[in-house]
Image (cartoon, rainbow, N blue to C red):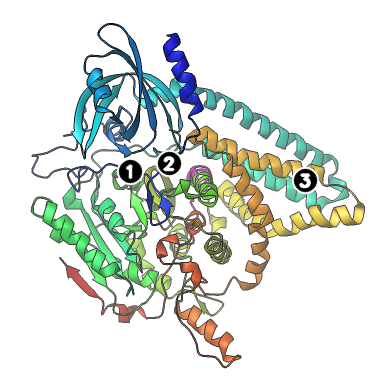
Amino acid sequence: MSFFRKKAEKHTADKKKNVTLETFDGDILLSERLDRRILPDVPDPTGQRTSFDRRGVVDDPNDVDAVMKKRKSGIRYKSKFPVTVDFRDQDGKAHSVRGESRDISETGILVRLEKEDAEQLKEASGTELRFDIPPGSMPEGHEMSVHTAAACVRVFERDGETCAGFEFAEDLGTYMHRHKDRYLYVSSVILLLFISMMVVLMRSESVIYFKYNAVMYSYSIIAAMFLLTRYAFGALYRPVKIDPAFKPSVTIIIPCFNEETWISRTIISCMNQSYPPDKLEVIVVDDCSTDRSVEVIKDTIEKIASAEGERMDIRNRLSYIVQEQNAGKRAALCRGVDVAKGEFVIFVDSDSFLDPYAVVNLVQPFRDPKMGGVAGRTDVANTYTNSLTKMQSVRYYIAFRVMKASEALFDTVTCLSGPLSCYRKSIVKEHEEAWLNQKFLGHKATFGDDRAMTNFVLSYHRTYYQDTAVCSTIVPNKQKVFLKQQMRWKRSWLRESLMAGAFMWRKEPFAALNFYIGLLVPILAPIVVAYNLFYVPFTQHIFPTTFLVGLLLMSLMMSIAQLFFRKSSTWYFGFLFCLYYEVVLLWQMPLAWVTFWKSTWGTRMTPSDVKEKEKRQRHKNAPVDTAEPDAIEKNEGTRAKADAVSGEKHAAPSAGKHAENKRGKHANV
């Protein structure tokens, strides 16, 4: 084994070697090796093929959890990182060869090797693989060093390369649990308990000194307890289990505006659902795009129809509508609802991609007849693009898995986020006109559509969060776009939260209390931070040690919670996000206080933006340029998804009336 040990030392020295990650339109995304079939996860109504023709057999097809686990283990991700293969030949002589991965799954890996090395593996014994899975090559949490036994199951030529396929002695999920996950789990639990105890002790100090500044110490006690209870409730949350017999008819509606880059992928993901084909339809509503979106939509529908049309009845289940004028995201959604056949409607953003089991999981909470709406979980698709996207990835996961999950315990999720949400169609129809024509302080509401609809639903019904219904979405990778979207997010959050305050008092007492505290804490936060970091040090010459330690602990709480749930290498970006929030994002709130009624978009030229620009340029006596601002870049796919976390999501312009939208063309291909 000394031979292999020396080779292992050399392998370790190569850890920092560059690896290749696949980029798409400037973003780093997971790249799955596609199935031969365009819709491999859709149950075949003819019974000729199953979802496991290439992924193995499940003992009980009705055991959805087992089916999902089997599918997950069979997904092959394209990769390109160094792999070392150790083995012994027929004479017992040790060999070690280097290769490069081509794809990897939970159960095996495909490696490019020199032809003579690959030939030796056919008769080899004691084969072991050593490699490092770099971040971005597999789903979050898989990044780690691997040294495992494996069997070479085939050697073949492909695209001029000699490749060897290896099957792991144990799947990567089991390997991770034994070598990484259980240790991270214990460590994160200890750290979370320690941080919680430190926060409680520090708030005890606030009680002692309460008489010296009752207002500030009251705020610190309330804010700390609010956040601690959110994490505690989030840990207690459990998603609704799947009842295989409960599969109501649903219609997925995809509003689209200038989304030529991602819309095809979105449509395919919505069609590729493990759900009865006769109970699922998809409607794409294009809001008068000025790019190639409509062309891409048509081509995608034709591609699916040509491959699966007759067997899956694609031409009656997948259709598109083109609005004759740009009328806004709400109008596009309402147009889709008007022609939807399903009992439930699912809203999906045009740059969000559904997991094949998203729909079947999303509808399960509706077994409760009082349930009005359900939100799925939104992950970040381009996590590993840069530091900004990594921070957003942590923020997203905690916002959904902790914050929304804690609200779900009381059936009062206050935002059914735009990337993936489901409603009873009858409720949406009931509030359609009010939602479409919503105004606040005399101004048309052009964004915050998902939180606005949530308010209509939550005022008389229950809302829930289903963590097992997963989609991934594209978030902004540039600071300028991100900051503009965050400003819009704060405005819509403030507007809709004030409106929700009129009825939340009727909900379960603890849920209502949490809502009102959750409204006051962010609004007052800039004042509290300014008081502690500027007023006290300069007027009383006291360094704000206690305050800074408190911020540090709450930042660490977010990071360690990410480590606890996901075991991901991105965990420390939660801490960085909290610092970024305190230094930059927090100070957008005062501006939101005095401008939250504004309806301008900021990063695209909606009618409100055009009017605002005309007003500014009128004073300069200059011609008005209605071109898209630079922040848009070339692709609307970079639109801020922080809105999905808060409930504010990109809404297209709202220039037309609902009656005018009826003129949209409804085409069945």
Left-right relation of 632 to 218: left
Spatial CA distance of label 1 from label 3 is 42 Å
Quarter of the image that includes the N terminus: top left
- Between 211 and 324, the residue placed more toward the observer is 324
Q: Could you say where residue 182 lies in the image, as x and y percent from the top left? A: 49, 23
Residue that badge 1 annotates: 361
- Between 202 and 551, the residue placed more toward the observer is 551
Spatial CA distance of label 1 from label 2 is 26 Å
Q: What amino acid is found at the position of numbered circle 3 in the picture? A: Phe
Spatial CA distance of label 3 from label 2 is 36 Å
Label 1 SS: helix
Q: Residue furthest bottom?
A: 621
Q: What amino acid is found at the position of numbered circle 1 in the picture? A: Asn
| Span colored in magenta | 401-416
Q: Residue at x 20, y 43 (%)?
A: 40
Mark 3: few/some/many CA within 10 Å (<14, 14-19, 20+): some
Choose mark 1 or mark 2, whichever is in front: 2
Q: Could you say where residue 638 lies in the image, as x and y percent from the top left? A: 44, 60
